[in-house]
Image (cartoon, grey):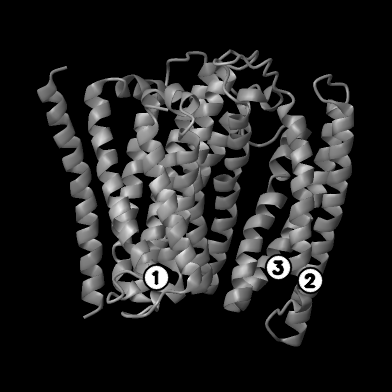
Amino acid sequence: MSGLQIVLAAILVNGAVLAVALLAIYQLNNEVRRSSR
Amino acid sequence: MHVIPQSWSHLHILVSVFPPFGLLFTLGFYLAALRTKNDGIRRTCLVLFVLLALLSVPIYISGTGSMAALSGNARVPKDLMDTHYLWGIAALVVLVISGVVAVVELWRAQSAGRPSADPFHLVLGLAVVTLGVTAVASEFGWELNIGELQLGTPIEGVSTSSAWLNAHLILNHVPTAGFVFAIFFYLVALVVNNDVMKQGSLILFVICSIIGVPTYVAGTAAMWALTQPAVAGISKAVINAHRDMALWTMFGLAFTGAAAWIELWRYRYFQRFSSVSLALVLLFAVVTLGIMTETGHRGGLINHPEIRTAADVLPTDPNAGWSPAIEKLMNEKIWFVPWQIVHFFGYCFIFGAVFAVALRVLGLWKSMSFAAMHRLLLLGFLGVLMNVFSGMMMMLADSYHYVVDDSLFAPKIALIAIGAMAVLYFSESDRLWNVKAGEDAPATAKWVAAIVLLAWAGVIVCGRLLAFV
């Protein structure tokens, strides 16, 4: 297992997890913002 | 349906779980009802006290049936069985009395056309006493049950403490029995459209999901207690079948708890529930309860040969299934390292959000209203989700080393549960929500904030010291 492969796997997994988390925050915050107008 | 009891002792074990845990959850709701003066919840609790009292009939019949069946069994000490019987009878008597008083209270409220007031808190007091006596009776029943396991003499440095086994067997009833009662309250709340009861049920779903984490960890340690050194009659393949189902339970709990928490969080801003989200929580909860039933049954098969039926085909390959496959994968760096990084990102989310909110409660950044800080809790919640998943994966890489060898793993997991429940207070307290910019938070909230800070700081410290102590 080369170091490069591990780095790529880490970027892939963390990118996916963080993207889902940030999308959830974005969606829910948008909803709250719209309701408070 | 292989999960339907085929013997008195199996029925007795199943039914007698409900009074102690049921009383605990119903009392929680009852106290909430008294505090919020919510008549709908009070009446539902009174009905539940009556239903729990009715369970005394199957408990008594199955108990005497089990006594007759086990009387010749050398593994079951007679004096312990007699003590359990005496405490059991005392528990059933107070259980029935509290049920009768609940009926009277329901009838009085109904005939007078007024909310049930429980003058002198008679129902409350009786329910507390009943909870205490049933807990003692259950403890003796428990010893009878666990006594069947011949764990042998512990070997220093090899054996895993049997305390893990006890912890797992007690903890697993919180999510399982908890879900039964949470679904009951939730369904009643949906039918009578009682928002406070909906909130209460959603909170119970979240609490059960939080307790799912220490249950899973204690279960992993219990596996080592039963397999290293090997215990006669215990098969690793049967344990793995249970673990695989427990993995699905964790997912079910995560989905239900997450959907319930998000809906609680949204409720703060909209002051009404979304019917789609409520239906989703119900769907997740029912499916999860089904998975938990199968998980519990498979767990029972590990050490209860008497509940096995001819239809049960027990697995024999200790390497089959999801759990051993995940263990093997997580032992490779390319799997372990990315999830470890997710775990660290999760920490940042949790500590960033929780510390900021706790410091505001303690008096820092008073120019911010609590409602503004409340939004940050979402970040912490997502961090908890990320870390439960990544932490579980990492634990599976070398669970003996993490759970059994490292003395700081157990406190870490206990602190996670305490910290998560304390944060639940932040997301749910009405008094805190109403703290405006420039205002001081209530004293109770400050104590909770101190617990939150200490608990999560403890989690970080224990986690970091794992490899070194």
Relative height, residue B393 to residue B111 (above, below)? above
Q: Amino acid at mark 3?
A: Leu
Q: Amino acid at mark 1?
A: Phe
Subunit bearing disc 2: B
Q: Amino acid at mark 2?
A: Leu
Q: Secondary structure at mark 3?
A: helix
Q: Secondary structure at mark 2?
A: helix
Q: Quadrant of residue B8?
A: top right
Pointer 1 and pointer 3 on the same chain: yes
Give the mark nearest the N terminus, 1 or 3. 3
The percent position of residue B401, horizontal first and vertical second, equals 43, 22
The residue at the point 49 percent across, 39 percent down is B411
The percent position of residue B300, horizontal first and vertical second, equals 62, 30
Q: How many neighbours does mark 2 have within 10 angstroms: few (below 14), some (14-19), or many (20 or more)? A: some
Relative height, residue B320 to residue B178 (above, below)? above
Subunit bearing disc 1: B
Q: How many neighbours does mark 3 have within 10 angstroms: few (below 14), some (14-19), or many (20 or more)? A: many
Give me the C-alpha separation between circle 2 and circle 1: 34 Å
Relative height, residue B90 to residue B297 (above, below)? below
Please give the residue where the numbered disc 3 appears in the rendered image.
B46
Please give the residue where the numbered disc 1 appears in the rendered image.
B273
